Image: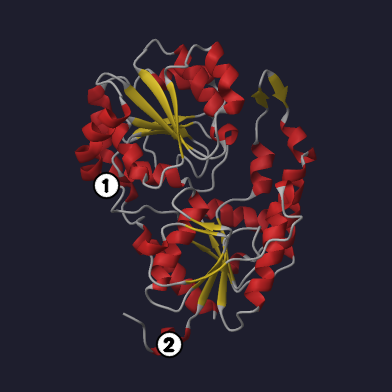
Amino acid sequence: MSPSGPAADLRPSLVFPAATHRGGVERAVWEALRHLGARHPTTFVGTELDAPELLPPVVHVRPDLPRWGVGALRPAAFRTAARAAVARDAGATTMSFGVNAPAGDVLVVNSLHRSWLQVGQPVELRGVRVPNAARYALPRHQVLLALEWSYFTRSDPRAVVAVSARVGEELTELYGVDPALVRVVHNGFDPEQCNPERRATKRDECRHALGIGDDAVVLLFVANELHRKGLGVLLDAVASVDDARLEVHVVGRTPLDDYAEQIITLGLQARVIYHGPVADIGVAHAFADALVLPTQYEAFALTVVEALASGLPVITTTVPGAGDLIDDGVNGLLLHDPTDVEELTALLARVGDAGTRARWSGAAAGSVAGLDWPTLMGAYEATLLAAR
């Protein structure tokens, strides 16, 4: 039903390269289109729109990216092209979802690249140990840092939506954003995809389809940034646990090429399975026994929220934004040092007991009550209305 009265003239325009089911920010944009498109004339300015048939009618404007927009320059190219597209839609209230978009009336901030670089640990890639400081010299990071700086210091938003209170504090500390502009709205989950009943119902079917043995204990790792999320540490820990039933199933759009040598050296070729990106994360929850995310930096981990909503226990770090929803020993376990293989090994040794996992599972879904997307999108809408 279309709104009437004060809300009737809201014409939101959401800007980000992609609105899909495959990623945290991408999913938030897609859910915002689903909610807002049912209530207001809504435009999406971006290159990729997933499953438009599942959305209300929205206008999809594809920016014409310049030819120089490849590699490290692609985020800057999208911002340039999207700015021109937004300028043609005068009167719309714009909501921008990342620093690769032109700054709009409302800025949605899911993470800060500068914060991640400040806490990042060295990475060993193909036998070479790369210090964290080396990242600052890479073109990709230089471009993102420059875009982030201009996004927050050269814009005049009417509101800023931070995915967590900590992100709101970092915005003020690092970029001088007025805290009076900041409103916290967390990441959420789709209750149709992620719920304990669905996970239980689909478990046998999904495991059989993938050839997962009855005795296998599946550790699910969901990420697009493999190093930051701790895949290397997880692999080392799995190889150290005296339990051959443990398998690592990786979901995300980044292939495991950089970890191929490590997997072979550890003898895990048959116990590490790459699934690529999935449109329905609830299916992955169904075949899994626990989500493991030894992440170094998070703003508010969507994958943790979704797993808990499905009743899947979670092992993650005490890093703010990752372990905030974990009650240690109740709905999962907490790792204090994201780089400590021995500590993670000890935690994984506890996952093998089916009774323990069942107890954690029973407490999982209740810990994310109120974080469903329909509820959260009401807060997005209220912020847009106030920002007109």
In the image, taking residue 335 as reference, residue 329 lies left or right, namely left
Is mark 2 in CB contact (under 8 Å) with mark 1?
Answer: no
Residue furthest bottom as drawn: 5
Residue furthest right as drawn: 137
For label 2, the crowd category at 10 Å Cα-Cα, with few meaning under 14, some 14 to 19 and many 20 or more, is few
* Total number of numbered discs in the rendering: 2
Q: Nearer the viewer, residue 339 or 200?
A: 200
Residue 25 % position (x, y): 52, 54
Tell me the quadrant of the picture where the C terminus can be found: bottom right
Residue matched to label 1:
195
Q: Give the structural element (helix, strand or loop) at label 2.
A: helix
**Amino acid of disc 2:** Pro
Q: Nearer the viewer, residue 211 or 2?
A: 211
Q: Is residue 243 above or below residue 248?
A: above
Mark found first going from the N terminus, 2 or 1 = 2
Residue 156 shows up from this direction: no
In the image, taking residue 136 as reference, residue 295 lies left or right, namely left
Q: Is residue 369 above or below residue 59?
A: above
For label 1, the crowd category at 10 Å Cα-Cα, with few meaning under 14, some 14 to 19 and many 20 or more, is many
Q: Quadrant of residue 247?
A: top left
Tell me the quadrant of the picture where the N terminus can be found: bottom left
**Amino acid of disc 1:** Asn
In the image, taking residue 118 as reference, residue 361 lies left or right, namely left
Task: Say which of marks 2 and 1 sits in front.
Answer: 1
Q: Residue at x 45, y 72 (%)?
A: 58
Q: Quadrant of residue 146?
A: bottom right
Residue 281 shows up from this direction: yes
Numbered circle sitting on residue 6: 2
Q: Residue at x 57, y 17 (%)?
A: 262
Residue 282 % position (x, y): 33, 43
